[in-house]
Amino acid sequence: METSGTSRPERFFPLFSSISNLSGVGPRATLALKKLGVERVRDLLFLLPVGGIKRRKVFDLVSISLPEIITVEILVKSYQQTKKPGPIRVLTSIRKSDLDLVFFNARLDWIKTVLPKNEKRVISGKIENFQSGMQMVHPDYIVSSSESSTIPDFEPNYPLTKGVSKKFLIKIMLQAIDKSISFPEWINESIVQKFQWPRFKTSILMVHNPKCIKETLFDYPARERLAFDELFAHQMSLALARLHFRRIRGVSILGSGVLTKKLYDSLPFSLTASQEKAVNEIRQDLSSELRMNRLLQGDVGSGKTIVAFISMLTVVEFGAQAALLAPTEILAKQHYKVISELSEKININVILLSGRDSGLKKRSKLAQIQDGLAQIIIGTHALFQENVIYKKLAFAVIDEQHRFGVHQRLNLARKGINVDVLSMSATPIPRSLSLTFYGDMDMSILDEKPKDRKPVKTAVMPASKLELIFDRLEMSLDDDRRVFWVCPLIDESEVLQVTSAELRLEIIEKRFPQKKIGLVHGQMSSNDRDKVMRKFIKGEINLLVSTTVIEVGLDVPAASIMIVEGAERFGLAQLHQLRGRVGRGSEQSSCILIYSGRLGKNSKARLEILRDTDDGFKIAEADLRIRGAGDVLGIQQSGVPKFMVADLQSHSHLLEIARKDSQLLLASDPGLTTPRGVAVRDLLYLMDLQSSLAFIQVG
Ligand code: ADP
Ligand code: MG
């Protein structure tokens, strides 16, 4: 049976037709609406009110607090225009009070038709004090008394843009709502019951017809339901991808434990509890016949490398090969060094495959990989070039996985038959974001640091104290300490950034003529960059001026001072990453965050968070609160879902539920063929995620 239709059924066509098909929407409005993210009728349905206006119905002007938006019946008395052209005042009365209606740029004869003398009309608008009386400038509504019910008591506000007025938006919104259709329920009934959520179509009607401000808030049930729809659809697509990836591999990798025991015996420390837990989770995955796709997330210095190494040992014990993929040569080399040292007492064959290898050396390495002599292979993307043939690759660890494209990751996976994949990331992110962006992976988190790690002392200082900073720096350099100096982030211009770094280099060189100072930036070739970095690692350079290119994960234990200029322009997570470059040795390390200009209260509070905590996960939560998801992840590329209704903070409690339920559903209905499964397909069509239906196994 064909079960994975990935094109949208016909009944969705009206919802997915262009908004230009709505009446009154011309080419200009189409363009303007696009700015609001609205291109199709469906998009309009998910463009939700942001607050609204209460129009209080009153019968006199006795009890109102000015200014206020009111709806009231008036009697038109006379017209006044003191000079032409000039504003027209319409004098009216309400019981015993007077109210002037004021019109600018209006024609008197038009006014006389909508507000005829000696007649009653119901008007609505903002009433305010003017001189000794009260006035209303340009009422929003003027209707006859019999039509007064057409004026809403509460009116939603929508996000607007030039060329899209509120009136216009409401007009086309009504047409869009007309096209919305009823669907069978795709949410688990018990969840619907628990939250008392209305059905989908009812929810759409409710969110667009709020009766009060409360009904425009994130926790309004109808709105919550639509947020859940969105999150659940996204989690479903991730769960489908996960299931697809995990499809039976058929081999369960069980280690003998011999090598691992030797390693444990030789380690100068014992694992932290969260390292133990991660190792167990990974071993569990390895032993399962399903394929592993796990993310190991841990703050800088939390000890991911050893966890990866222990996992690789299990694979080696089993008689297969493991590969460790690093984003740059220098990081590959660093991993190689660490892992070689760790394996000294174990007697296994670890090799580094570098893009720089050539001739005999290269041939020998390739031969070792092909005949299985090489047990652990470390390298950059050179690892999956065509000429690299593995005897039995079963496990791949990908360091700093976000720096590799999906393509490269897949390439490596192809080198072995359905290899297990462990990704590692040193960017702690809040749970809600993890679930959203890495929801297709299982997760292990290292949320504690090895004991007796000295936190980096952090200071926040204004640029005006640069001289003082230089003085202190001089002492440190005389003590032979190694220093990172990171130059300000300059928006959108690599070149400007480089110029500023070069300028800074000049100033520092003048100030410290005796010291060896180096520069790295993004315009240098990676070869040249590596050269300078290596000099810094060896201590041939004392102070390294850089743009933000310095490597995540770069380990220079001798470096103990990190100075960041223009710190206010960095994200908290990014600053935390930079700070993580020091504090890796035995010395007490320090970090100075220099801000330029006068800092607002908020910006200062932001930097102070960093000064006060060393916990990457806490910092990431704060960053999410302050800056939003895109910035926390540091990714702007496509593939980052933009939610229309869901708010990752206000609705984070729904994410967990959505994730669990999507996995639960797929466990019992992997082909989405039950009535609920079929309803969920509708949801995926509606949310434009039907491509994930391709992950369903056909037949
Ligand atoms: P990261 O997670 O940033 O990659 P590393 O794996 O580089 O961290 O580990 C940082 C340092 O901590 C290394 O020198 C490592 O040997 C050490 N380390 C790892 N685990 C422990 C532990 N449980 N106790 C003490 N030191 C540890
Ligand atoms: Mg690391």
Image (spheres, rainbow, N blue to C red):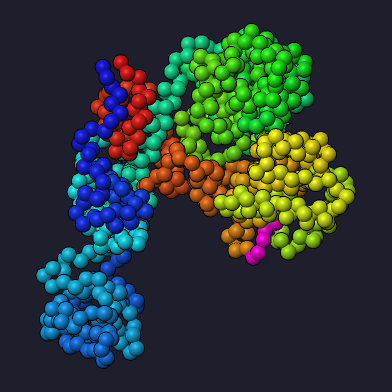
In which quadrant of the rendered view does residue 675 lie?
top left
- 352 or 469, which lies in front? 352
- 196 or 529, which lies in front? 529
Q: Residue at x 76, y 62 (%)?
A: 465
Please identify the quadrant where the C terminus is shown: top left
- 218 or 144, which lies in front? 144
Q: Residue at x 16, y 87 (%)?
A: 77
Compared across the picture, whether 627 is left or right of 11 comes to: right
Q: Is residue 387 above or below residue 503?
A: above
Compared across the picture, whether 416 is left or right of 127 comes to: right
Q: Is residue 187 above or below residue 207?
A: above
Quarter holding ligand 1: top right
Q: Is residue 112 above or below residue 328?
A: below
Determine if residue 75 is in view.
no
Compared across the picture, whether 226 is left or right of 556 comes to: left
Tally of numbered discs: 0
Give the magenta part as a residue range: 592-598
